[in-house]
Amino acid sequence: MFPNAARALSHIHDCNAVHADFRSAKILLDKDLEVKVVGSVIIPCVKFTVTSDYNCYTDPVCNITKSVTHKSDVYSFGVVLIDMFCELYAKSLHMKKITAARGIHHSDLDDNIRKQMHSEAFTILSETINKCVNGEREERPDMAEIVKQLEKSLFLQWKHDKPMLQKIGLDEIKTATNNFDETYLIGSGGFGMVYKAELNLFDAKFFLGTEGKIKKETSKKPNLSYKQFVPGTEGKFKKEISEKPNIFDAKFFFGTDWKIKKEISKKPNNAYKQFFEEGNQMKIPKKYKTTAIKRILVDEKGHGRKGFFLEIEMLRRCEHPNIVSLLGYCNEQSELILVYEFVPKGSLDDFLESTKKETYLTWVQRIKLCLDIAHGLDYLHTNMTDKEIIIHRDIKSANILLGNNWEAKIADFGLSKFYSANQLRSTIVTNNIAGTEVYLDPEYSRTGHLKKQSDIYSFGVVLFEILSGTLAYEKIYIDENNKGIAAVARRHFSEGTLMEMVDPEVMEEAEQLCFGLKVGPNQKSLKSFLKIAIQCIAETQGERPTLKDIINELEIALNLQEKRMDILKFSLEEIKFGTQNFSDKNFFRKEKFGKVYRGEVPYDNERKTVVLKVSRKEHNFQRELEILAGHKHENIIDIVGYCNEKDEKIIVY
């Protein structure tokens, strides 16, 4: 919050102006707690009259000179920080004035803040406040410097809250990318450049189990929690001068007083109990990992800087298999760099755009891909910690990354918004419309009303991209409607031709049975998918489904496709039981390619009366089964299943 207020004042000062009346009442908060500074702005050095009601905020030098400068705002900002962190607003204005005069101490902090705040973060904060309220104007920092110090304090607090987020040296990143050589470049955009590189990172698996919990050891020592031994991290890993350079000093990382006297065994995961024993020596291993390094560009308005901090704030709280993991960061010199897990198959838009696809995504793979995205969004919207949820605001195929097994991960949180789950209203009203045009919720774009349903609209556009195998902004769609694929899909729906949106490769898909037979996609599965996809891109937010509904419908579509072959297949034992071992009593007639029987088979938890054709020829059996299973029609008899055991080839109608 306060870095943003500081940025606002810094911007005013860059315009060669002064606020001259900065105080807590001049900071407004919108629905998502974004800071908005209000009040009059004047030219520096003008004559100024102190307002007695609020003189505790006013630069005391003004009483002498009767004029204001940029440093007058700095003083006022310092008092506002005292307001916030010491909760002195409810006390007398006189008390705030005394505190400003003597400087802020740790004992001044509000009790709740004191319990949460990291000591080093407080040190930087208190030093900044005390410099702001210095009685001599020339001793006060400018607002640009204050922004940097508040960001630094915020960083230390973040690392205290989630120490596994590592600070990575700029030199290490430059070495790994050969000073950001183009050969390492894997992506680019308005945000900056993305590079692929091997980095030597702290090996979290050494301490953590697969679900992020400390592994227990069979030991007389108590099983300490993670928080008991991680606080105090310095944020840097001091490397040991050793024959084994791939290690760093445990004492430095954890901020403990533990002595070092033993080496880790060749099996480091057996060394946990050594770590807890007083006086034990232990080296914490690092491990080379393939990473994606985002080098952020900062424009004149500082947008890149804001996005950098926002992504850290968002992703440090996220732990989900369908959300890309943030491993570390670098903010040295003028560089702002984020380091993510590397997701090997790149972005979904690159895959869809490629004219030379080496891999074809089956219908099952496409549904699973959509389910991954839905589960990731559901986590952001409902399962975040701290009673806050995240609205992504930029769901699109370019921000969906694909793993080795075609699992999807949501990325790029630079435009995201926090939202309190406890707020009575479920809408954020904003004039700052953000997102990508063809994926943008039309109601949000028109009214500024941002809701979780805005993400659902964007997701609906991605559903149609995956369904059609094309990008939302391809020429074929933009030529018809500048809103892209969503508008075209709605037109097809109104005309009853929505099936025309399906990728021809899906319609021609051949899914192989265990004995070589191939059949096309399940029509009910396609219809189930289309049903929910078209609801997602409804033009009004109230008409769109919830993520629970979306996940349920996609699971139905997946089940219809995946279970199809299991439903179709009957065992020979079931067939014999249903026909009384092909008795004459159940014989119906003889045809050119085999005999036909009446019988009963288990189907949908009941006994179903069916007709069974026992075929004599493999080719005829496979051909008929392929046609009937892959091309259903209301005027052609439905196939119930088949049996292909012990040379018996039977089709069940």
Image (tube, rainbow, N blue to C red):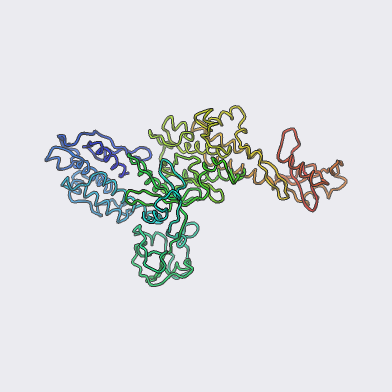
What residue is drawn where x is 82% and y is 45%? 615
Most distant residue in the left direction:
64
Picture residue at 74% right of the left edge, 38% below the top = 638
Quadrant that contains the C terminus: top right
Residue 315 visible within the image? yes
Task: Say left or right for 635 vs 584.
Answer: left
- Using the rendered image of the protein, determine whether residue 573 is visible from the camera's viewpoint: no
**Considering only vertical position in the picture, is 47 above or below 559?**
above
388 vs 620, left or right, is left
Residue 16 relative to residue 611: left or right: left
Placement of 358 over or under 491, stated as above or below: below
Q: Where residue 71 appears, x then y in whole percent?
A: 20, 42
**What percent of the width, then of the height, locates residue 116?**
33, 53
For the N terminus, the image quarter is: top left
Note whether 297 is above or below 289 in the view shown: above
The answer to whether 87 appears left or right of 202 in the picture is left
User: How far across and how far down the image is residue 593, in percent?
Assistant: 84, 43
Q: Where residue 112 sits: x, y (%)?
A: 32, 51
